[in-house]
Image: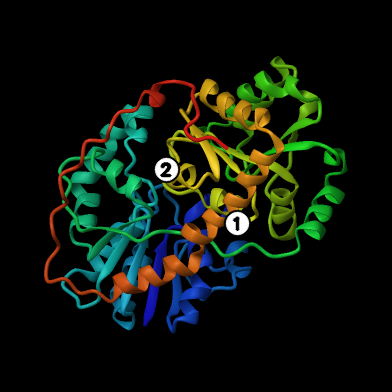
């Protein structure tokens, strides 16, 4: 089977979709699939030159929407070379280009929404939602409607996506998602990280690792950490990942006002051994995100045996709490602080149990070979017609959803 991923950019600073492609590549190849990636980057872009994948780079593009007629022409000419096309994300031209280029042809396309239909965006950016509603009617609705399948990472993402835009009609499929098993050798990886950041030696590290963006709730984490840092002077918050200057300045100012300047480290974007070393040096991983369809970094932390403290807006929180691999609470400073406090107050045996469960949860649910197999099974299906979406079920309301009480116990 020959597969084509279509994505606006393969720059890793852009977030999770390209990392998901990279993670799926080898297990798909192990199962006989050939993988190409079509993107809107310039052929001489550093991310293209450094990529280990077979990349068709058709940029650069000059607009935020990513209008790229070269991509449309290339897809029309070459889509027939593939057994299926996978559209990575929405709201940019690459998705509409795929829909137009493949319409009436024999090659099916599937769409990974990557959380981009989550209603949080409507609530957080109401004016942008009005503009997106127009895009939806003119483009994105038809992208999903004509797709052979719309792929979600978990049932929570599927459920939440149904309420974002109207009309909504597509063939929904839960494909799962995952990441490769982390490299073995925790001790040398930890030592490499601590050698690069010697001031962290001997600290109890609370780690955030990923793209630092307002939706990730890093301001909530800083405030929650300030409330709980008095429990132990060794506690130290590490924020690792790319960040825009304005947000970095805002978070640094918040930390200074809370008296945390000496207890927060900015590690920048980490990769390779330093990234894995950061996980192994951490006591817990925190992601109090306002919206997260999956969270590759969450799965990576679990794979390293690191318990995760997350918000209930990270769509895989139910599975993690059910497995006893972490704690979840509301996406507020109080909810984040309650999770951190519960971890700190747990006895050593309970903490050790959660570490063991973190690894078990990863192997059971989020190891990438499982999601690769599920994806191939989906791509092998050929339903006669696209079915309408089922009515959205009404979720049960729990009192914890509006309180600071974490969901789950060690």
Instruction: Locate residue 55, reporting x and y percent.
Output: 50, 72
Could you say which is closer to the camera, residue 48 or residue 123? 123
* Neighbour tally class for label 2: few under 14, some 14-19, many 20 plus, Cα within 10 Å: some
The residue at the far front in this view is: 349
Q: What's the residue at 59%, 73% (across, down)?
A: 52
Q: What's the residue at 34%, 40% (across, down)?
A: 118
Q: Earlier in the sequence, mark 2 or mark 1?
A: 1
Image quadrant assignment for residue 145: bottom left
Note whether residue 177 is visible: yes
Distance between the Cα atoms at labels 2 and 1? 17 Å
Q: Which mark is residue 318?
A: 2
Task: State left or right for residue 371 relative to residue 185.
Answer: left
Task: State left or right for residue 353 relative to residue 17.
Answer: right
Instruction: Locate residue 117, reporting x and y percent.
Output: 32, 44
**Residue pointed to by mark 1:** 303
Could you say which is closer to the camera, residue 269 or residue 192? 192
Instruction: Locate residue 404, reporting x and y percent.
Output: 49, 22
Q: Circle 1 — which element?
A: helix
Q: How many labels does the image show?
A: 2
Note whether residue 57 is visible: no
């Amino acid at each position: 089977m020959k597969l084509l991923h279509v994505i606006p950019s393969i720059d890793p600073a852009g977030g999770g979709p390209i990392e998901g492609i990279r993670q799926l590549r080898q297990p798909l190849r192990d199962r006989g699939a050939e993988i190409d990636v079509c993107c809107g980057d310039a052929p001489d872009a550093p991310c293209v030159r450094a990529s280990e994948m077979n990349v068709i780079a058709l940029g650069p593009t000059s607009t935020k929407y990513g209008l790229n007629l070269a991509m449309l022409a290339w897809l029309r000419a070459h889509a027939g070379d593939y057994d299926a096309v996978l559209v990575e994300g929405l709201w940019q031209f690459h998705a509409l280009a795929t829909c137009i280029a493949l319409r009436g042809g024999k090659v099916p396309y599937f769409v990974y929404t990557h959380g981009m239909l989550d209603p949080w965006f409507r609530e957080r950016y109401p004016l942008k939602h009005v503009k997106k509603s127009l895009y939806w009617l003119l483009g994105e609705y038809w992208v999903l409607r004509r797709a052979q399948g719309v792929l979600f990472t978990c049932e929570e993402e599927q459920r939440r996506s149904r309420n974002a835009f109207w009309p909504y009609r597509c063939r929904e499929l839960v494909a799962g998602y995952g990441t490769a098993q982390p490299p073995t050798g925790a001790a040398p990886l930890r030592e490499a990280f601590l050698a690069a950041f010697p001031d962290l030696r001997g600290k109890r590290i609370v780690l955030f690792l990923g793209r630092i963006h307002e939706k990730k709730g890093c301001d909530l984490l800083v405030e929650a950490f300030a409330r709980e840092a008095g429990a132990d002077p060794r506690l130290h918050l590490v924020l690792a990942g790319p960040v825009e200057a304005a947000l970095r300045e805002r978070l640094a100012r918040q930390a200074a006002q809370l008296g945390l300047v000496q207890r927060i480290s900015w590690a920048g974007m980490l990769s390779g051994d330093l990234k894995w070393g950061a996980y192994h040096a951490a006591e817990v991983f925190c992601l109090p995100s306002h919206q997260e369809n999956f969270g590759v970094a969450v799965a990576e932390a679990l794979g390293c045996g690191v318990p995760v403290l997350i918000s209930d807006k990270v769509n895989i929180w139910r599975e993690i709490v059910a497995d006893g691999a972490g704690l979840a609470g509301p996406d507020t400073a109080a909810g984040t602080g309650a999770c951190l406090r519960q971890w700190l107050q747990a006895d050593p045996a309970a903490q050790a149990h959660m570490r063991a469960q973190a690894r078990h949860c990863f192997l059971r649910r989020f190891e990438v070979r499982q999601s690769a197999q599920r994806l191939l099974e989906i791509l092998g299906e050929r339903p006669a017609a696209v079915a309408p979406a089922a009515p959205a079920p009404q979720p049960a309301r729990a009192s914890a959803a509006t309180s600071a009480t974490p969901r789950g116990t060690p």
